[in-house]
Image: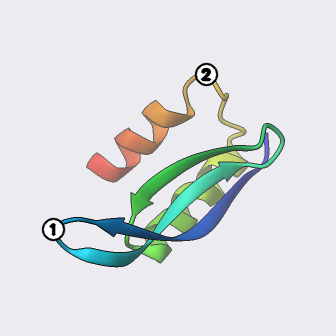
């Protein structure tokens, strides 16, 4: 798997437009939107996913665990 941090501009009815970062699985053309508004955190997560070659089956759980830590 190859994971990539992607910048996204989203809209929320309460806060308006905002910049956030998602994680794309480039091999599968799948994007997990709005992981964090913190670019450095999202890049750190992406690096760890790539380093440990996290499975597509559990990458969402890995991301949730990393954000909660």
Question: Number of marks in the image?
Answer: 2
Residue 47 or 6: which is nearer the viewer? 6
Residues under numbered marks 2 and 1 in contact, where contact means CB atoms less than 8 Å apart: no
Q: Which of the 4 image quadrants contains residue 41?
A: bottom left
Q: Report x, y in % for residue 54.
A: 65, 35
Q: Which of the 4 image quadrants contains residue 65?
A: top left
Q: Residue furthest right?
A: 27
Q: Is residue 69 visible?
A: no
Under circle 1, the secondary element is: loop
> What residue lies at 64% left-to-right and 59% top-to-bottom?
47
Q: Report x, y in % for residue 49.
A: 63, 47
Q: Which of the 4 image quadrants contains residue 53?
A: top right
Q: How crowded is mark 1: few (under 14 residues within 10 Å), some or many (20 or more)?
A: few
Residue 13 or 30: which is nearer the viewer? 13
Q: Residue 57 carries which label?
A: 2
Q: Quadrant location of the N terminus?
A: top right
> What residue lies at 37% left-to-right and 71% top-to-bottom?
37
> What residue lies at 27% left-to-right and 47% top-to-bottom?
68
Q: Residue 14 carries which label?
A: 1
Answer above or below: position of 43 versus 47: below
Question: What whole-number distance in Å separates the C-alpha atoms at marks 2 and 1?
Answer: 33 Å
Q: Residue furthest front?
A: 13
Q: Report x, y in % for residue 24.
A: 66, 51
Is residue 45 toward the left or the right of residue 49 in the image?
Answer: left
């Amino acid at each position: 798997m190859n994971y990539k941090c992607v910048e996204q501009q989203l809209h929320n009815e309460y806060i308006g437009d905002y910049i956030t970062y998602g994680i794309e699985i480039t091999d599968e053309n799948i994007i997990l939107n709005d992981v964090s508004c913190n670019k450095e955190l999202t890049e750190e997560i992406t690096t760890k996913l790539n380093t440990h070659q996290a499975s597509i089956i559990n990458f969402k759980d890995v991301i949730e665990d990393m954000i909660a830590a």
